[in-house]
Image (spheres, helix red, strand yellow):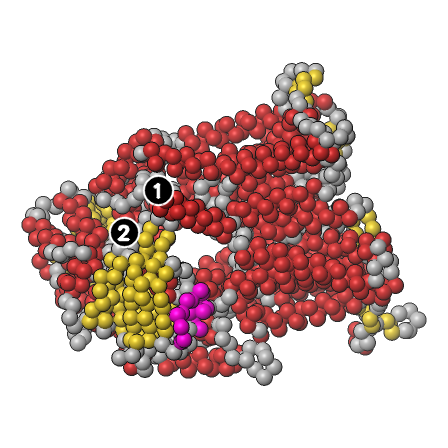
């Protein structure tokens, strides 16, 4: 098959860090090629270098049909050279209509030279209908759901007749149906000869839709493989650089511990928050590890957040250690021994410019109150303690946390909550966007916490993680709690059945 | 009401409120001050005449605000340009046309400065405007610390030629039975020309749409291949030129210059834009809405002055209250829409 | 460990580098100008730095600067915190200063020339002025913190209305105060050599330093300024913290208004605090603080305020008209802001990195 993109000997340095070192990458016509690696492997950097968001020091990029080496100095230039990108964060303009977003920068004009709105709207409708996307093209994008916004972004990239389409973690905010639609679209484009670079963390998706896999590690190329010749376990091993059987250990640990957790820590009776989650009942025992399963938007995060109080409940009752409580502010929840690791660590987790130390002690400080400042010496002790326990990779405890990789940031946030010695900890997608090695560490930690008598609620979009660690599974559908599975019945099939709710699919 | 809000775009709803407000106020004036001749159509036209300069400047401010920025130097620029006009024409004996050209060139030069600072050096527009404000206000004093006025044949033709509006039903019949048509000045024609051109530019050119895109989400605009830096640069360059033009038109109304002139005009322009539906967050705005905002401000001032005994500061307070109202309104609507979408 | 402390040292040094350099430059310009263009030909003229003691009080250009800087320093301290907590430039402080001065003088008397009043009324007037300042802060803070309105937008309202309300209080007149003791706040307290405004500013600075660093408030303000949502999740009352910074800023504006009014022994609603909001913002920027909020440096802002004041004084001493001074402020703003701009910073960092890499290779 014809090569439509070759990148050879790419070097890229940031101050003090070797981001890419002699990396090669090849994309062929009609190929869906996965680009994989842990955090810090260089995937994002390689893409940024290709699309002109970053410069690179040395190396050669060639695109089929273009004479000579290609150096993109901006996304605009990359687009002109046939390379379009769709990012994880939807990059549309919310204040413009769907149709305008599709055609911004390339609007068709009338005979007078002015923008031809009629054609824009008509063409937009055609393009979207071709892709089975049903939306009013004159609606402002900000009035559309996030999933639809993602599809519009992809439609735009596709419509610009790119030779090369880069999808950077496109499925993070999509539910299974939408992911399938995306794959159908990708296969359609593939058959037309388009080359697709698929950057993702989801192993299952890679095996479902990709032809080739390129693995990076620590800025270097590990290798390019076809999907057939690389079983999952080997892929993970190559990404981590070691043999991978730690997962087996976790499971046995889980089944070995006995269920001496009869004491009820938290009890919710018909607790609900309008618009977020319908009234639910749940009894949470001390030492429990509870998973929350459900489709995107089913209300898993909302349920956990309603218990924590950050999602204000407007009906029902909550009991902590037998006493009725009314939680209106997170600080009240914290004083009752709760903690919440939010889903979006960039948005609600890290305080970017503050140091690792300050990020770690901040929750404990809030608990103590504004007048009882934790002394500098003690802050340093606390920070060092968790940097050590959690193996947080940072130059120094006073390094701004924004300079750490995603996984290490997540560890720091975890350390923040562990420092408050909570009885009850909610971990909302703690492993999202994290490399496989850290994922395992976090899962092990969850089990360890339970063994120490702490209670954990674990939400993850990767069912396997929850199956591995949880002793109870709560099933959510459309913001209703629809069921609970005890430990022995936890399996992928049972969970899927419970989510689907009686109707037998495939 | 909530359904109506979710169905209409935010901007449409806000403009609707502004229109209703304007009609109510003007109608109230006609009723209450009928005896003082408020109903004379000339009163309506005078609003345009006294505010022609502000209309042009507010339109430019709208464009800058849509791009997500702001220009707080405009008041000081007006003072500087007026002083320049007076000094050039009266003291340096430069012909009017050349003086106007020089002022526009100054506006372009300032626009280039602001454009480079905001677009290429990534400096906050507020701060850039601050420097411009200081500079222009100070330079006004450097030219002349006193008061100047301008009285020149060519300039007077531009400034003071009355243009009759020969529409019969608008005319009043005076005591001698003669029809008196309402009149306008060239400044108003210029203002409307500017408005129309800007409207077409914002709605029907790639450049105009790029401004909206950048104001809506600059990161997205960049990733979609728009040349954000160039667009922002051009916005400020244009702003410099248009504000200079608006200042010349302003001078046609005041025919003079002094150091403290137009102090606070930038806030009038911003208030007009906001009342007219422009969002201070960027991405939303419409020059005709802004026109409505200027008319609202002018009507309030007219109402206060027709009242006779109220201090003119009341007008400022009322406008500030309206501004507060519209700011809070925009914030509430955004919330209702966000809840509806989720 | 050594590497870390020296990096830390460099960081701290770097934070105050900007304001201190600015101040030094202003001083240097004065010396150069006076030495070259002075009356007695070219010679090193350091008269600018002379301090004399007359009648038990200190006099001299430097004292002048410090005296008149008092109000601006206090405004800068208030502004630093609103910027830090909410990226909020409170542009209403000038108008609020005028309003509070008007309130004060109205409590003192109803006439256009206030001749006499008791100490009790004086204290009452002060408290009233401070209360009004704090109330304006509550208004601004509520809009910003609870209604999520952009700070520049929210404070725009009082900016437009504040002076109008002040004018209404004084009926458009300039109110004069004839009692001698009214002037003390703006010049000297009897038997105290240091200018009173300076003393007040120092007290405010010291108290705020203690409050911000001996309690967790400084950390809270920074956290909220950097990430409001995350701060909420960890139990901080982000809204209340932001509101408090605006209330404090409003209070600072009231003190400024009282000082400025005392300086001229009158209340001119049009001119008190005119353009001072801009000077305050400039002080915060020169002080090395990011106008985008987050981490802040109080001392930097204080030096920044003194620098601005020095600039004005220096220029006036060079026979520049007070209305022409803004031109120089413009040049200063532009220079500093360009230097601080992310583009230039990036260029400087790249140069340093390349130099370091080259150095490493050689070594």
Residue at left offset 53%, top offset 66% = B212
Residue under pointer 1 = C363
Which of the 4 image quadrants contains residue B209? bottom right
Residue at numbered disc 2: A407
On whether residue A150 falls in the magenta region, the answer is no
Which sits in the foreground, A2 or B321?
A2
The residue lying furthest to the right in this view is B176
Q: Is the magenta stretch mostly helix, strand or loop?
A: loop
Query: In this orientation, does residue A93 appear?
Result: no
The quarter of the displayed image where residue A461 is located? bottom left
Query: Which residue lies at the image location 31% right of the left edge and 40% below the top edge?
Result: A396
Looking at the picture, tell me which residue is in the foreground, B123 or C77: B123
Q: Is A73 part of what is drawn in magenta? A: yes
Q: Which stretch appears magenta?
A: A66-80
Mark 1 chain: C
Graded by Cα atoms within 10 Å as few (under 14), some (14 to 19) or many (20 or more), the crowding at tag 1 reads: few
Q: Distance of mark 1 from mark 2, alpha carbons?
A: 35 Å
Secondary structure of the residue carrying tag 1 is: loop
Counting labels gives: 2
């Amino acid at each position: 098959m014809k090569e439509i993109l070759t990148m050879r000997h790419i070097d890229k340095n940031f101050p003090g860090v070797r981001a890419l070192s002699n990396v090669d990458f090849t994309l062929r016509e009609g190929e869906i090629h996965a680009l994989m690696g842990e955090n810090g492997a260089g995937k994002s950097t390689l893409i940024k270098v290709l699309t002109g968001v970053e410069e690179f020091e040395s190396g050669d990029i060639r695109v089929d049909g273009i004479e000579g080496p290609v150096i993109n100095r901006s996304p605009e230039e990359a687009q002109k050279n046939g390379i379009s990108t769709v990012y994880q964060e939807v990059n549309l303009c919310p204040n413009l209509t769907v149709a305008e977003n599709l055609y911004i920068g390339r609007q068709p004009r009338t005979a007078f030279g002015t923008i031809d709105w009629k054609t824009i709207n008509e063409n937009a409708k055609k393009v979207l209908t071709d892709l089975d996307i049903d939306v009013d093209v004159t609606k402002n994008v900000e009035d559309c759901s996030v999933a639809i916004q993602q599809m519009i972004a992809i439609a735009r990239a596709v419509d610009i007749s790119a030779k090369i389409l880069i999808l950077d973690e496109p499925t993070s905010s999509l539910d299974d149906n939408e992911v399938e639609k995306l794959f159908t679209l990708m296969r359609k484009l593939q058959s037309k000869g388009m080359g697709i670079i698929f950057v993702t963390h989801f192993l299952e998706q890679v095996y479902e839709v990709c032809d080739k896999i390129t693995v990076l590690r620590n800025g270097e190329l590990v290798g390019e493989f076809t999907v057939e010749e690389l079983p999952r376990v080997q892929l993970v091993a190559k990404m981590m650089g070691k043999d991978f059987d730690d997962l087996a250990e976790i499971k046995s640990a889980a089944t070995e511990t006995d269920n001496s957790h009869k004491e009820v820590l938290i009890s919710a009776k018909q607790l609900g928050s309008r618009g977020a989650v319908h009234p639910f009942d749940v009894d949470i025992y001390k030492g429990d590890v509870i998973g929350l399963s459900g489709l995107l938007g089913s209300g898993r995060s909302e349920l956990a957040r309603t218990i924590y109080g950050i999602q204000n409940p407007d009906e029902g009752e909550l009991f902590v250690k037998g006493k009725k409580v009314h939680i209106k502010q997170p600080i009240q929840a914290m004083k009752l021994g709760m903690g919440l690791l939010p889903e979006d660590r960039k948005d609600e987790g890290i305080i970017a410019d503050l140091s690792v130390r300050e990020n770690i002690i901040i929750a404990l400080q809030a608990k103590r109150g504004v007048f009882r400042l934790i002394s500098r010496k003690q802050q340093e002790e606390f920070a060092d303690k968790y940097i050590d326990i959690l193996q947080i990779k940072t130059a120094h405890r006073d390094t701004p946390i924004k300079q750490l990789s995603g996984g290490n940031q997540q560890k720091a946030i975890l350390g923040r909550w562990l420092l408050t010695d909570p009885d009850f900890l909610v971990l909302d997608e703690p492993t999202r966007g994290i490399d496989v090695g850290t994922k395992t560490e976090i899962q092990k930690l969850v089990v360890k916490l339970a063994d120490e008598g702490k209670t954990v609620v674990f939400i993850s979009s990767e069912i396997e993680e929850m199956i591995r660690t949880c002793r109870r599974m709560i099933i959510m559908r459309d913001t209703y709690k629809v069921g609970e599975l005890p430990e022995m019945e936890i399996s992928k099939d049972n969970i899927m059945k419970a989510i689907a709710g009686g109707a037998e699919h495939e | 009401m909530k359904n109506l809000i979710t169905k209409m775009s935010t901007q449409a709803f806000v403009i609707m409120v502004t229109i209703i407000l304007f009609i109510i106020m003007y109608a109230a004036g006609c009723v209450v001050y009928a005896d003082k001749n408020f109903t004379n159509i000339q009163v309506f036209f005078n609003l345009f005449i006294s505010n022609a300069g502000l209309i042009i400047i507010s339109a430019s401010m709208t464009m800058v605000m849509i791009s997500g920025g702001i220009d707080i130097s405009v008041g000081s620029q007006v003072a500087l340009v007026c002083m320049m006009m007076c000094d050039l024409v009266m003291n340096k004996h430069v012909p009017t046309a050349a003086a106007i050209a020089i002022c526009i060139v100054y506006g372009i030069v300032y626009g280039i400065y602001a454009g480079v600072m905001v677009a290429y050096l990534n400096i906050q527009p507020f701060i850039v405007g601050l420097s411009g404000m200081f500079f222009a206000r100070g330079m006004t004093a450097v030219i002349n610390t006193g008061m100047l006025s301008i009285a020149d044949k060519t300039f007077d033709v531009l400034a003071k030629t009355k243009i009759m509006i020969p529409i019969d039903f608008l005319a009043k019949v005076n005591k001698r039975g003669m029809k008196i048509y309402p009149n306008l000045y060239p400044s108003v024609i210029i203002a409307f020309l500017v408005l129309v051109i800007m409207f077409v530019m914002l709605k029907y050119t790639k450049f105009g749409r790029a401004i909206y895109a950048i104001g809506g989400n600059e990161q997205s605009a960049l990733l979609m291949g728009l040349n954000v830096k160039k667009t922002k640069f051009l916005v400020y360059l244009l702003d410099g030129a248009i504000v200079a033009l608006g200042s010349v038109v302003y001078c046609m109304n005041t025919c003079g210059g002094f150091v403290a002139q137009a102090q606070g005009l930038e806030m009038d322009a911003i208030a007009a834009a906001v009342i007219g539906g422009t969002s201070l967050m960027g991405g939303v705005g419409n020059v005709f809405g802004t026109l409505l905002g200027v008319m609202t401000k002018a009507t309030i001032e007219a109402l206060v002055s027709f009242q006779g005994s109220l201090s003119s500061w009341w007008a400022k307070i009322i406008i500030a209250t309206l501004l507060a109202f519209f700011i809070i309104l925009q914030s509430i609507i955004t919330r209702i829409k966000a809840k509806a979408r989720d | 460990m050594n590497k870390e402390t020296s990096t830390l040292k460099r960081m701290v040094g770097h934070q105050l580098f900007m304001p201190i350099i600015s101040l030094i430059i202003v001083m240097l310009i004065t010396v150069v100008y006076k030495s070259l263009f002075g009356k007695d030909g070219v010679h090193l003229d350091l008269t600018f730095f002379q301090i004399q003691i007359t009648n038990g009080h200190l006099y001299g250009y430097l004292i002048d600067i410090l005296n008149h800087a008092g109000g601006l320093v206090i405004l800068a301290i208030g502004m630093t915190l609103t910027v830090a907590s909410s990226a909020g430039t409170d542009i209403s402080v000038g108008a609020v200063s005028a309003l509070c001065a008007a309130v004060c003088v109205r409590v003192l008397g109803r006439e256009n020339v206030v001749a006499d009043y008791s100490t009790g009324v004086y204290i009452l007037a002060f408290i009233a002025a401070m209360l009004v300042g704090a109330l304006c802060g509550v208004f601004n803070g509520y809009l910003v913190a609870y209604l999520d309105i952009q700070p520049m937008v929210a404070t725009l309202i009082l900016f437009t209305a504040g002076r109008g309300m002040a004018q209404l209080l004084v009926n458009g007149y300039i109110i004069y105060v004839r009692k001698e003791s009214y002037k003390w706040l703006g010049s000297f307290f009897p038997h105290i050599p240091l200018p009173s405004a300076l003393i007040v500013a120092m007290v405010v600075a010291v108290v705020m330093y203690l409050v911000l660093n001996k309690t967790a408030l400084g950390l809270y303000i920074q956290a909220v300024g950097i990430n409001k949502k995350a701060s909420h999740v960890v139990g901080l009352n982000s809204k209340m913290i932001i509101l408090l910074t605006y209330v404090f800023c409003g209070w600072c504006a009231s003190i400024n208004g009282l000082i400025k009014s005392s300086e001229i022994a009158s209340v001119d609603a049009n001119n008190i605090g005119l353009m001072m909001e801009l000077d305050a913002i400039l002080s915060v920027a020169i002080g090395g603080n990011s106008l985008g909020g987050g981490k802040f440096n109080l001392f930097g802002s204080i030096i920044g305020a003194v620098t601005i004041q020095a600039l004005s004084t220096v220029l006036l001493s060079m026979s520049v008209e007070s209305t022409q001074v803004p031109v120089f402020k413009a040049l200063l703003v532009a220079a500093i802001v360009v230097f601080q701009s992310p583009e230039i910073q990036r260029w400087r960092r790249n140069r340093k990195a390349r130099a370091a890499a080259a150095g490493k290779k050689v070594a």
